[in-house]
Image (cartoon, rainbow, N blue to C red):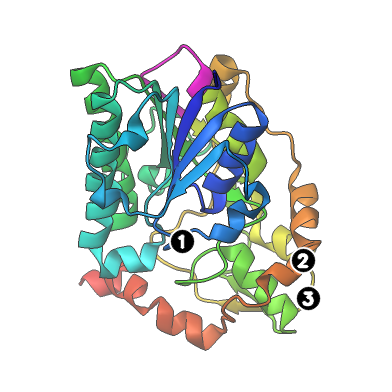
Amino acid sequence: MNDKPVALVTGGAGFIGSHMVDLLIDRGYKVRVIDNLTGGREANLAQHAGNPDLTAEWLDIRELEPESPIFGDLACVVHFAGIGDIVPSIERPIDYMATNVQGTVRVLEGARQAKAGKFVYAASSSCYGLADVPTREDHPIAPQHPYALSKYQGEQACFHWHQVYGLPVNSVRIFNAYGPRVRTTGAYGAVFGVFFKQKLAGKPLTIVGDGTQSRDFVYVTDVAAAFLAAAETPLSGKIWNLGANDPQSVNRLAELIGGERVHIPKRPGEPDCTWADTARILADLDWRPRVPFAEGVREMLADIETWRDAPLWTPDSIAEATKTWFSYLSEDGKS
């Protein structure tokens, strides 16, 4: 008889999701993964090959049926599945709403009908827009682009299911997660993938604006630990900000990576600083970040060859890729 608790991780072959799988298995869970492999990679789960405690289904959450057996006997659902990036969301808003909102509703319905345990939603700090810092959970909501809007509406759906159906829900608003397995392909976006490939190619690092803008980078294993705490706590109906409470400038990241730099235009709708006020998650879950920024970057640099096949971005290709961004989000573009 197997009495291990069972967790469902949507997007479990992705960047954060795969680290969540690692932690859950290490903590004695059986894990079911759903991923359509658009952003995730089977290789992210390769270390668990042959482990009977892991099963995976390569399907899209938009195709989930509430009566699917994948929802049976669950201790918790950790919902990472969705699509990210700003520019594609501006160009394809229907896809973002369909996946990040309606896809979330399908996972919620499956969890509700199966009477699953805690439902933990991976929300985005982008819901705050150009926020005051440090940013608390009660900061006004002001999404600047369809990605941010879709993630926030997914969160609203979660709490509606909590309110109407009694599904135990918590939401964790991630600020700037980084670490091994961070996405290396697809649309222009993640700064680490951009910089590491440029370093490998001997090209200058493309610094947006003057590089003094800062981000509250939080290491991915710390993110997974926070989500596990959010799943195992008796608390529900809660929202927590998740960051390191220690913003780092893009110039500091470039300094740690090393190499020449070139500056490209600052982009509209991007905050000068993201900074999570983490007092609530510390008080409620006794969570705190364990990996300092310099150590985290050093760990990633040790595996820089992972980015060998990543796209190489140049000032010209970035300008072309972000043309839509400037067109729709700048004041000139709106006039």
Q: Which residue is drawn at 25% across and 67% down?
A: 92
Residue marked by disc 1: 39
**Does the magenta portion include 71?**
no
The kind of residue on which mark 1 rests is Gly
Residue marked by disc 3: 259
Q: Which residue is drawn at 40% across and 57% down?
A: 84
Contact between labelled residues 1 and 2, with CB atoms less than 8 Å apart: no
Q: Is residue 60 above or below residue 164?
A: below
Mark in front: 1 vs 3: 1
Q: Quadrant of residue 238?
A: top left
Q: Which residue range is magenta in the image?
A: 231-240
Q: Which residue lies furthest to the front in this view?
A: 1
**Residue 7: percent from the left, percent from the top?**
48, 30
Q: Residues within 10 Å of mark 2 (few under 14, many from 20)?
A: some
Residue marked by disc 2: 257
In the rendered structure, the answer to whether residue 246 lies left or right of residue 303 reads left
Q: Which corner quadrant holds the N terminus?
A: top right
At mark 1, the secondary structure is: loop
Residue 277 makes an appearance in the image: no
